[in-house]
Image (spheres, helix red, strand yellow):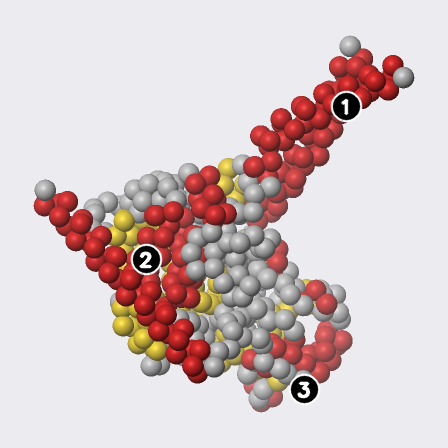
Amino acid sequence: MKNIVSTLFIVALIITSLSACGNEKQSQAQQKKERNVYYGNFMLDTHYKSLEELAYDADLVAEIEVNANNHNISYIDPTFKTIEVKINNVLKGDSKIKSQAIRILEIASTVSENANKKNIVFLDKYEGPLADDVYVIVGVYQGMFKLDEANQVVYDADKYEGVKHFQASVEGLDKQSFEHRVQEAIKNASPPQPNIPQLSEAEKKLAEEEGHKMYLEDKKRLEEMKKKSVEEKQK
Amino acid sequence: MKIFAETKKRFKLSMIIVILVASVISPAISNAYEYYGWWNDPYKMIPGISSGTYIVDTIDNYNYNGKVFMFQTAWNSAMDEWNNRTEANIQNSINVSGPERIRMRGENYGNVGLQGWVTVYKNNVVVGDGDATPLPVTSGWDYAIATLNAHSLRDYTYPQYRAVGIHELGHALGLNHETDGTPSIMNDKLYPPNSYLVPQQDDINGINNLY
């Protein structure tokens, strides 16, 4: 009897530690359920690996403030909206816009659902059909660094299934130290690594030709499927 | 000596039981593919994926700044890849009738920083809580809109942006991003070393296990 009990105890111990992994996932899922921000469904253009890369792609780097009482949000569609923010300080760009309001084209409620009122952001002027005279955050959310009540840097995109590459190295910095790091990054700005291999002109031409072959094969197969479907309907 | 022999026998019995139990539990908690929501009750396309239709709301020969995209064929083939490799059977509404489950778009959205994205709906309402857009996936859905952004794909060849389309459809069908390095078209970056052009075995397992 004693042997059976001790055997079952060992088994129960091991099963409990295995299922703890599942419970941890459950509690994480519960936390996710309580949030209003989510970056998980995006295919990012660029994964930024340093402040220098963010600075390179930014037209404007500034401390902004979100007015919690009046977001002045304009909805474009379920994915995009614009939000008005105030510029408190300019680190890169036209310093004349200090104290003025600008609009940010927001994706995934990066700014409007942010509980932290003050942020240091890397912004690019938006070029596209969705809105005029607005900015976008470089890297969707990667170029946004929140300032908490103690004026320390917070970057928590990973909690919302976003990416976090180098940002952990600046978390917890006080505002002054972070601004100093940003100023250095602006001076030493460097382009982000391209996503796809950089090909020679000859290689590009070959890749396009191979791609076009695949397109023709796909088109032919889809037309055959459509023809077969029509024939079946007529039977 | 007798005590040692009994302990050894007890240990062997314990390990046999653990292995039997672990073989039941471990597939549920150690797979590479990722879902939305709770690991034991993940969110997915509520009506299932073995029927229904899709609409391709874009064209071939879409011209953006001199680059010509074959978005329509890319999207059709992308859905075909999932239909051919998994239990999915969502067909083009041109060929069959049935409730629309997925709409696919492709055009220029400018420098928003995204190559593609998916928004999911339930009963015509965007899934999620609060005013955030897009919203966290907090329930199953019955409709999805998948989008490709011509601006961000301007340097991509046809196979490459077709692969992004396959990735976005993976989201519409219920797969989350894959981040542990397993070969998967659901990697959050589809460039070297993760340059997959079709669903990989882990992606196929993920879809077939979900429905």
User: Is residue A70 something one can see in this rendering?
Assistant: no
Task: Identify the amino acid type marked 1.
Answer: Phe
Tell me the distance, in whole angstroms, between the alpha carbons under discs 3 and 1: 64 Å
- Give the residue at mark 1: B11
Between residue B133 and residue B181, name the one nearer to us: B181
On the image, the x and y values in percent for residue A119 come to 63, 71
User: Compared to A168, does B12 lie above or below?
Assistant: above
Residue at disc 3, secondary structure = helix
Dot 1: within a 10 Å radius of its alpha carbon, few (fewer than 14), some, or many (20 or more) residues? some
The residue mark sitting in front, 1 or 2, is 1
Do the residues marked 3 and 1 share a common chain?
no
On the image, the x and y values in percent for residue A99 come to 59, 82
Circle 1 marks a residue in which chain?
A: B
Task: Identify the amino acid type marked 2.
Answer: Ser
Task: Identify the amino acid type marked 3.
Answer: Lys
Q: Residue at x 44, y 78 (%)?
A: A203
Circle 3 marks a residue in which chain?
A: A
